[in-house]
């Protein structure tokens, strides 16, 4: 099986030009270069998805730089890890980075460690915030609706025929809350 070299180039807007990236990638004799004019923030990048499906173990992907490949450090790490598991080598020209060299493998390990560290810090801060709020007597979740007000709102709608918006104006209940309780009331009626 012959190993193939693919390129990937991306710019963020339709007005930007891919020429500089394409010139660099062509020096690597890529069999096909996947190009996109799409913001890196977008989760779905159709050409990148095609590339992910096309490559096989032993193939190479050449990129101009990591900033053109991943949306964020986490996304970049996930992409590198995805291709690493498939046995695909990634070469970044600007960073002089090759995932198959010992230095590249070390950097992947470091990237993964920082990504895990970042996730752990976020979880820790979230738990600290929740504990701090609880210590001050604050409870998370949806605020409870007074049952008398809820019964009144259901009665206004079901027996007196007021519209949902009229009921919500009169009782102060949000429409989403009203609809949730109305659905629950109807489900209970069907069971009995």
Image: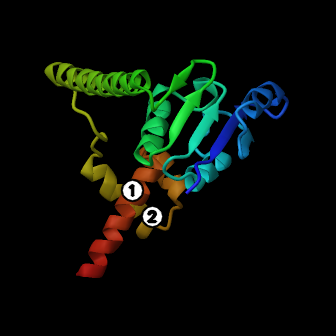
Q: CA distance from mark 1 to mark 2?
A: 6 Å
- Quarter location, residue 158: bottom left
Whether residue 51 sits left or right of residue 192 in the image: it is right
On the image, numbered disc 2 is attached to which residue? 157
Q: Residue at x 85, y 30 (%)?
A: 15
Label placed on residue 153: 1
Whether residue 180 sits left or right of residue 43 in the image: it is left
Viewer-proximal residue among 184 and 43: 43
- Which quarter shows the N terminus? bottom right
Whether residue 131 sits left or right of residue 36 in the image: it is left
Disc 1 to disc 2: CB gap under 8 Å: yes
Q: Position of residue 108 (x, y in %)?
A: 39, 27
- Picture layout, residue 142 above or below residue 139: below
- Quarter location, residue 154: bottom left
Q: Is residue 147 visible?
A: yes
Q: Position of residue 49 (x, y in %)?
A: 60, 50
- Which quarter shows the C terminus? bottom left
Q: Position of residue 13 (x, y in %)?
A: 77, 31
Dot 2 alpha-carbon crowd within 10 angstroms: few under 14, some 14 to 19, many 20 or more: some
Q: Position of residue 35 (x, y in %)?
A: 74, 41
Label 1: state its secondary structure: helix
Label 2: state its secondary structure: helix
* Residue, far left: 135
């Amino acid at each position: 099986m012959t190993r193939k070299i693919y390129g990937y180039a991306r710019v963020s807007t339709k007005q930007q030009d891919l020429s500089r990236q394409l010139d660099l990638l062509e020096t690597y004799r890529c069999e096909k270069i996947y190009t996109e004019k799409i913001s890196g923030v977008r989760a779905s990048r159709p050409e990148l998805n095609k590339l992910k499906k096309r490559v096989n173990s032993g193939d190479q992907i050449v990129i101009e730089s990591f900033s053109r490949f991943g949306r964020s450090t986490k996304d970049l790490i996930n992409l590198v890890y995805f291709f690493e598991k498939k046995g695909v080598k990634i070469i970044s020209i600007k960073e002089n980075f090759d995932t198959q060299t010992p230095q590249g493998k070390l950097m992947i390990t470091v990237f993964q460690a920082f990504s895990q560290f970042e996730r752990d810090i976020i979880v820790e801060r979230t738990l600290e915030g929740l504990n701090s709020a609880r210590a001050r007597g604050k409870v998370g979740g949806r605020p409870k609706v007074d049952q008398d007000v809820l019964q009144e709102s259901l009665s206004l709608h079901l027996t007196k025929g007021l519209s949902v918006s009229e009921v919500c104006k009169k009782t102060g209940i949000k429409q989403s809350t009203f609809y949730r309780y109305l659905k629950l009331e109807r489900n209970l009626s069907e069971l009995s």
